[in-house]
Image (tube, grey):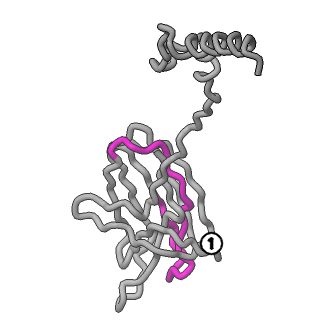
Amino acid sequence: MNPALRLIAVPTLALVVAAGCGSSQKVNSAGPAARPAAVQAKTSTKAPTTTLPPAPVITSMSDLVALGGASSPVRGSIKINGTVYENAASWDFGCGNAGAWEFDLSRSYKKLTAVIGVDDGAVSTDQVTVKLLADGNAIGQASTQLGKPVPIEVNLENVLRLRVEFSRNSTTCVAETGYSTNAAFADGKLTK
């Protein structure tokens, strides 16, 4: 290489190195606040997020435990008008003609949906009436009998106690076993 060229190339290289390494500029590692605006905008842009409403929380009526000395629901499957409902809460009248459940709902539910009906294995064609009371106030009533289920939907907003009263128009039963008529809340669901 020509010595004259070498002298020119070396100082130029020295200037480039000096500007990159020996200058008083500081390396910017302070984060997004110290970055140029164009870089900040590019790094702080996030994809929009979509917030979905929470799914409703559903409790099966057969999971509720009756308060006090009342009989709790008989849980399990029941056949009403030829349809088997795997999740049912039923009342066995035995040789009586009335009964009740009372539940603490803690003001936690918005509605109750169910199919009210009489078990296909009932020993008679009893007319069964179911009354629903919220904190002592009537909120619904349905009458049913063998082969005639009734769908219900009841508002439970701000209800502390739910009382379910059962009655039938006879006391027919098999005296040896006490078996008679079962009334049920089939697929009973309480929605929060």
Seen as rendered, the residue at the extreme bottom is 176
Give the secondary structure at mark 1. Answer: loop
**Residue 16 to residue 96: above or below:** above
Residue at screen point 48% across, 49% down: 57
Is disc 1 surrounded by few (<14), some (14 to 19) or many (20+) residues within 10 Å? some
Q: Position of residue 88 (x, y in %)?
A: 49, 68
Query: Residue at label 1?
Result: 147
Q: Nearer the viewer, residue 49 or 191?
A: 49
Q: Nearer the viewer, residue 75 or 147?
A: 75
Q: Position of residue 153 (x, y in %)?
A: 55, 49
Q: Position of residue 157 (x, y in %)?
A: 44, 39
Q: Nearer the viewer, residue 126 or 118?
A: 118
Q: Is residue 184 left or right of residue 11?
A: left
Seen as rendered, the residue at the extreme top is 24
Q: Position of residue 27 (x, y in %)?
A: 49, 17
Confirm whether the magenta stretch covers residue 111: yes
**Residue interval drawn in magenta:** 106-130
**Amino acid of disc 1:** Gly
